[in-house]
């Protein structure tokens, strides 16, 4: 092999090894996308909207922008809603959001929302 071909081959191999991590991420995004597309066929919502959302999630996953917030952020968000309640109702709201005591959760986001109920015995 002459020197030019060896140099070109080395560059191609080096570029390929750099692309492998991003290729793995892209394949992961693609497999998630295929699962989400399959889900769109069985949900009770606009299929086109579902497919758009799946495509947007795939795009964000490929560019590394699809992350989950820490669990504490979700809890802080839920408890911030309780701050809007009258002062007498805030402790019960916070108990429902934390799931403490005898709390039940029914419904779904797809169905229009979650209904949380906490039963507090009065003595």
Image (cartoon, rainbow, N blue to C red):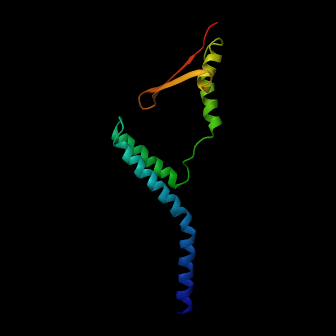
Near-viewer residue (103 or 79): 103
Residue 84: quadrant of the picture: top right
- Quadrant including the C terminus: top right
Residue 7: quadrant of the picture: bottom right
Residue under the image location 44 percent in, 55 percent down: 31
Near-viewer residue (106 or 31): 106
Picture layout, residue 24 above or below residue 55: below
The mark tally for this picture is 0
Residue under the image location 60 percent in, 28 percent down: 78
Which residue is farthest top? Answer: 123
Residue under the image location 38 percent in, 40 percent down: 49
**Residue 37: image location, x then y, percent:** 38, 47
Tell me: 79 left or right of 109.
Answer: right
Picture layout, residue 51 above or below residue 9: above
**Residue 54: image location, x then y, percent:** 42, 46
**Residue 13: image location, x then y, percent:** 55, 77
Which residue is farthest bottom? Answer: 2
Residue 6: quadrant of the picture: bottom right
Picture layout, residue 63 above or below residue 105: below
Residue under the image location 40 percent in, 45 percent down: 52
**Residue 103: image location, x then y, percent:** 56, 22
């Amino acid at each position: 092999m002459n020197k030019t071909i060896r140099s070109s081959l080395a560059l191609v191999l080096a570029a390929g090894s750099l692309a492998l991590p991003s290729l793995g991420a892209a394949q992961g995004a693609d497999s998630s996308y295929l699962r989400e597309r399959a889900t769109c066929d069985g949900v009770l919502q606009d299929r086109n909207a579902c497919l758009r959302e799946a495509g947007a999630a795939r795009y964000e996953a490929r560019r590394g922008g699809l992350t989950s917030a820490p669990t504490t952020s979700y809890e802080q968000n839920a408890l911030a809603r309780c701050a809007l309640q009258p002062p007498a109702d805030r402790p019960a709201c916070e108990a429902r959001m934390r799931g403490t005591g005898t709390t039940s959760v029914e419904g779904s986001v797809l169905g229009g929302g979650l209904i949380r109920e906490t039963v507090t015995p009065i003595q």
